[in-house]
Each structure stands twice: as structure tokens, then as C-alpha cells.
Amino acid sequence: MNALFIGGTGVISSACVRRALAQGIELYVLNRGQTAIRPLPDGVKILPGDIRDPASVETILGALTFDVVVDWVAFVPEHIETDLRLFRGRTGQYVFISSASAYRKPLPGLPITESTPLDNPYWQYSRDKIACEERLLWAYREEKFPVTIVRPSHTYDCTKLPFYGKYTALDRMRNGEKVIVHGDGNSLWVLTHHTDFAKGFVGLLANSRAVGDVFHITSDEVLTWDQIYRIVARAAGVAEPRLVHVPSELIAAYDPERGPGLLGDKAHSVIFDNSKIKRVVPDYVASIPFSRGAKEIVAWYDADPARRTISAEDNRLFDRIITAYESAWPGD
């Protein structure tokens, strides 16, 4: 079969590019240019273009048709309308990348299944993804547009530290400084290595059982946030990080830019039921524990000083939040 990926150099999509090629898929990638971090491998047929300029994309595509089209960079309903215009009659399956953050917050119960209601009052990003899903499902019902919806949760590669503050927080750990953990550190979270995600994802491509349906694809490993910080700390050679547990609402009050993503996603415990993806892609299994992934992340940062970006602004912000919290709860 052949497939078109719109995007293809991101954290998740780059692993799916490599998996698709390994499975013998004739892969086209439409994007604006290469990236040094995740370059496209040999074997990809590159279509240089910008999906935000649909007239030029239509010219680039010409008479090409595809068994599968995957849009990795559709975020709002306007993007979906563009794709509907471009790919009606041109593909046997259209895959939309949504987000597990779209599930209702607070969550009505665990584990999360694909039928868990969607509603996120905290985060516009999630509400936009919900609106995209609704538009596509309407197109499926009304005109049989062959959509499949995939909801990744927290999927990472070696470039992505999973916690608040990124490398600045890791540097603080190594310097023996205090590091913020939201909540009490005991809420549950799931981290999925991007190569594990790709196993399930590529199995959905040109799979007739996936058309008209919705899937999340995650690891079955469940960790507390304290465990996540300590796993990274050990990988970085820190025996015991100085963790300060701060209410998520307080963090969001001091950091309104990142607050919605915290309150609308990471502040909530998650456990995912992956039985649906395993039924449709029977060989799917997430086999990389975060203890291994954390070593990959730390090694990537340590391999090049240019990657170890420390934000003075974030350091000041973290100290302000910690001071405010410890002033209110001096006995902690």
C-alpha cells in the first residue's frame, strides 16, 4: 500500500515513518522541510509543501491517490475542513491524530476506554481536538468519509523530558536544588515510548476494522509522578532528588501559560484500557519501560552541551512558586 503523512518529523510521527517503511509501505511525506533532530530516512518520497497553503498542496499532489492519509498537524476544525476538501475521493482512509487529553476532566472513572466521554474545561488545545473529532465523525456518518481517530497520550522520545521544567528541572536535580512536583506526587501517569506507539499505529493503516472508529494507544506501565522524577534522577546520577509537592492550582496561578495543560491533563490520574487496539492490532505490545526511556533521554542531553538549555526565567519562576508554597505551609 501507499500512504501520505502530513508532517513526519515530530516525536510520534518520526517513529511511525520508520515503522511504516520497515513494514514495506510506500510512504510519501508532505512537509515544509527537514529537521536536524529527526531527519527523514532514506526511502521516503518527500513532497515539499505547506498544508496551510491548500492551493499549492493540490498542485503538488496532482493526480496522486493514497490508501492512507495521516495528518499529524491538524489542530483546529479549519484544518479538518482543508483536509476534507483535499482528500475526499483521494484516500481509502484518513487518520486524525487527536489527544487523550480530550477525555472528560475530572475523569468519571478508571480505566479510561475509548468510550469515556470527551470534555476538557481547562485546556483549549483539547477542546479543539474534540471539535475536530466531532466534525470528522459527522463526515463519516453523512458522507462515509473514511476516518480513523487516534488518541495518543504522553508519548516521548529521547529528546523529551516528561516533567515540569524540562532540562531546567533536571539541572536543578543535579545541583541539589528543589524541584516542583504537582499535587502530592502520587497521582498516576502513563508514558509511552514513541517506537511502542508506532507498533500499534502502523497496524491501523489500511485496516478496514479501524475505519469509522477511535483508538488510544499507550503503554500499560503505570507510574506515580514521584516515581517518574526519581527514575529520571537515577538515570542522571542523582541518588535522591529534592521534590517539593505543590498543588496544581497554585502552579497554574503562577504559570498561566502552562497551567491549562497541567489542570486539563497531567494533574489527573490516568490508566488506559488498551484492549481495543490489541484486538484490532493483535501483535501490539508496549515493551519499553520508562526506566529504559529515561536513560535514553539523559544520554541524549548529555551527548551535546547545546541541548542542555537552562531557562533563567523558569528558575526564577520555580523559586517563586516554591517560596510561596513553603510560606503557606512552613511545616512541609
Image: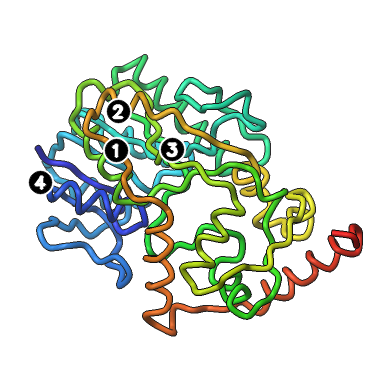
Q: Amino acid at mark 4?
A: Glu
- Foreground mark, 3 or 2, reads 2
Residue 146: x percent and y percent?
Answer: 27, 24
- In-image side of 332 versus 283 (left or right): right
Q: Is residue 237 above or below residue 194?
A: below
Q: Is residue 244 left or right of residue 79?
A: right
Give the Cα separation between the discs numbered 1 and 4: 24 Å
Residue at numbered disc 1: 285
Find disc 3 in the rendering and name its residue. 98
Observer-side mark, 1 or 4, equals 1
N-term-proximal mark, 4 vs 3: 4
Nearest to N terminus: mark 1 or mark 2: 2
Write down the residue under mark 2.
278
Instruction: Using the image as rendered, state which of residue 60 and residue 330 is in the foreground.
Output: 330
Helix, strand, or loop for circle 4?
Answer: strand
Q: Which mark is residue 26?
A: 4
Amino acid on which disc 1 is placed: Val
In which quarter of the view is residue 67 placed? Answer: top left
Neighbourhood count class around disc 2 (C-alpha, 10 Å): few under 14, some 14–19, many 20 upward: some
Q: Are marks 1 and 4 in contact (CB under 8 Å)?
A: no
- Cβ–Cβ under 8 Å for marks 4 and 3: no
Residue drawn at x 57%, y 78% as measured from the top left: 310
| Cβ–Cβ under 8 Å for marks 1 and 3 | no
Q: CA distance from mark 1 to mark 3?
A: 21 Å
Disc assigned to residue 38: none
